[in-house]
Image (tube, rainbow, N blue to C red):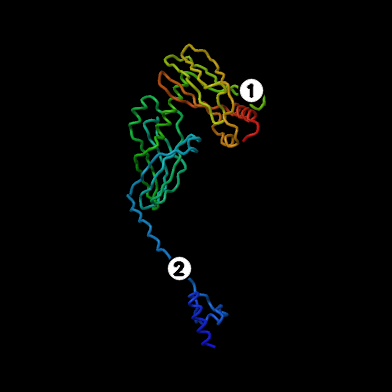
């Protein structure tokens, strides 16, 4: 019997190369009761060691940032990198910049672990230092951090603040232009946006211009840019009007129609009623954003929705 089994094994080896005289299999080649099938070899990769972190420099590093959410909330953030070997807890953070009239306090003070970074919110001042702003911008911004160490020791340090995205300059520039325009005239939107309720209908937006009468400045309103939901129904909005000391209050009627009629445009309509006005103030070009009040914004969006009918 064993001779016949050996012969069968040789034949099977020639055919499959898988025959074995292992006791875990029976004479038919099947697994014997209680036998374990041999497992394939498993190869593993040795993970590379993580790069070692450089030792702390013993200093604090600061930079200025602003997300879209920060901009909408009227703030920016100073980020503090605690490159020391111990956690610190700021008790006061003050940002100083020549473009602003006074140092600006930061909020949301909390612990910064060793070799970690935390952001602290700063409200944008309503009135930057607009006179001599170009000279002030040359002065390096800095932040003063008063803090307590884990051992309870109190320290205070002042470090420069980097601003690669020019957050402070962009805000100061735009806000100073807004204040300059306000000295010549107040720009606002009327709340009334007539709507027939018919699909494909147009309407009218009304930009109100109320001059202050103060001498010494001239404002030219060149054009107005549409939004993802509201745009001109008759060519471009290019009123090309000039306002000076003797100009009386007036209104600019602007024919309007929906820009797009898809659900995505209306779902993302946060800036649908914030219009960019291209202008010249005392001969210098610039842009200001004029937003509709809540009542006017609701009326404008309701018109666009009715004019669109079924959204795509």
Looking at the image, do the residues carrying marks 1 and 2 touch, with CB atoms under 8 Å apart?
no
Q: Badge 2: how crowded within 10 Å, few (<14), some, or many (20+)? A: few
In percent of width and height, residue 3 lies at: 51, 87
Q: Does residue 31 sit above or below 159 in this rendering?
A: below
Q: Image quadrant for the C terminus?
A: top right
Q: Badge 1: how crowded within 10 Å, few (<14), some, or many (20+)? A: some
Q: Earlier in the sequence, mark 1 or mark 2?
A: 2
Q: Name which residue lies at 52% across and 17% down.
A: 210
Q: Nearer the viewer, residue 207 or 160?
A: 207
Q: Name which residue lies at 48% across and 37% down.
A: 68
Q: Nearer the viewer, residue 88 or 29?
A: 29
Identify the residue position indicated by label 2 in the image. 42
Where on the picture, by quarter, is residue 194? Answer: top right
In percent of width and height, residue 154 lies at: 37, 47
Residue furthest right in the image: 197
Q: Nearer the viewer, residue 32 or 16?
A: 16
Identify the residue position indicated by label 1 in the image. 194
In percent of width and height, residue 184 lies at: 46, 18
């Amino acid at each position: 019997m064993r001779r016949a089994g050996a012969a069968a094994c040789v034949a099977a080896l020639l055919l499959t190369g898988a025959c074995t005289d292992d006791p875990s299999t029976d004479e038919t080649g099947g697994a014997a009761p209680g036998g374990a099938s041999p497992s394939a070899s498993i190869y593993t990769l040795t993970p590379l060691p993580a790069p070692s972190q450089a030792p702390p420099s013993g200093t604090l590093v600061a930079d200025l940032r602003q997300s879209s959410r920060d901009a909408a909330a009227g703030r920016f953030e100073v980020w503090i990198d605690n490159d020391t070997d111990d956690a610190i807890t700021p008790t006061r953070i003050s940002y100083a910049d020549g473009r602003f009239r006074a140092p600006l306090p930061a909020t949301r003070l909390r612990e910064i672990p060793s070799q970690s970074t935390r952001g602290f919110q700063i409200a944008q001042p309503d009135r930057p230092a607009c006179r001599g702003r170009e000279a002030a911008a040359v002065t390096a911004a800095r932040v003063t951090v008063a803090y307590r160490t884990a051992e309870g020791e109190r320290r205070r340090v002042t470090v420069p603040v980097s601003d690669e995205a020019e957050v402070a300059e962009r805000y100061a520039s735009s806000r100073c232009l807004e204040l300059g325009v306000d000295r010549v005239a107040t720009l606002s939107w009327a709340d009334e946006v007539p709507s027939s309720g018919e699909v494909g209908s147009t309407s009218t937006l009304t930009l109100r211009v109320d001059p202050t009468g103060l001498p010494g400045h001239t404002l030219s309103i060149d054009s107005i840019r549409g939004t993802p939901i509201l745009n001109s129904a008759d060519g471009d909005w290019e009123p090309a009007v000039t306002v000076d000391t003797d100009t009386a209050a007036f209104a600019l009627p602007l024919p309007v129609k929906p820009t797009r009629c898809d659900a995505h445009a209306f779902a993302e309509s946060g800036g649908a009623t914030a219009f960019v006005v291209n202008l010249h103030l005392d001969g210098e070009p610039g842009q200001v954003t004029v937003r509709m009040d809540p009542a006017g914004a609701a009326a404008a969006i309701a018109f666009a929705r009715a004019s669109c009918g079924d959204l795509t």
